[in-house]
Amino acid sequence: MATNITQKDLTLTALITHLDALADRYDRACRQADPASRDARVHLAGQIVTITDVKDWALQHLGYSGSTPIEAPNRSEEAAR
């Protein structure tokens, strides 16, 4: 599991790269499938949709996922008062 945001992004980027290659492979197979083999084409098209959904999820999770305050209060100033 990723231990920080940078590692998480590296992992997601590697996953996205892998999914792109996988989608290309399934797309080629779908175009080369026998037109009479409707079941094979439908199966491959379903695989492409699933890969696209996972890739979209990964893209949404790139970067920092929380909110960062614009300015954090300086507690040392409060303690000095």
Image: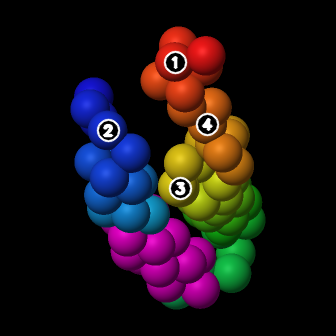
Q: Earlier in the sequence, mark 1 or mark 3?
A: 3
| Type of amino acid at the residue the image marks with label 4 | Ala
Q: CA distance from mark 1 to mark 3?
A: 40 Å
Q: What residue is shown at x 26% (from left), y 32% (from top)?
A: 3
Q: Of tags 2 and 3, which is closer to the observer? A: 2
Q: Of tags 2 and 1, which is closer to the observer? A: 1
Q: Which residue is mark 4?
A: 72
Which SS type dominates the magenta stretch?
helix
Crowding at dot 1, Cα within 10 Å, few <14 / some 14-19 / many 20+, comes out as few
Question: Where residue 78 appears, x then y in whole percent?
Answer: 60, 19
Q: Which residue is mark 1?
A: 80
Q: CA distance from mark 3 to mark 4?
A: 24 Å
Q: What residue is shown at x 52% (from left), y 18% (from top)?
A: 80
Q: What residue is shown at x 53% (from left), y 13% (from top)?
A: 79
Q: Which residue is mark 3?
A: 62
Bounds of the magenta span?
Answer: 17-31
- The quarter of the displayed image where residue 72 is located: top right
Whether residue 26 is visible: no
- Cβ atoms under marks 3 and 4 closer than 8 Å: no
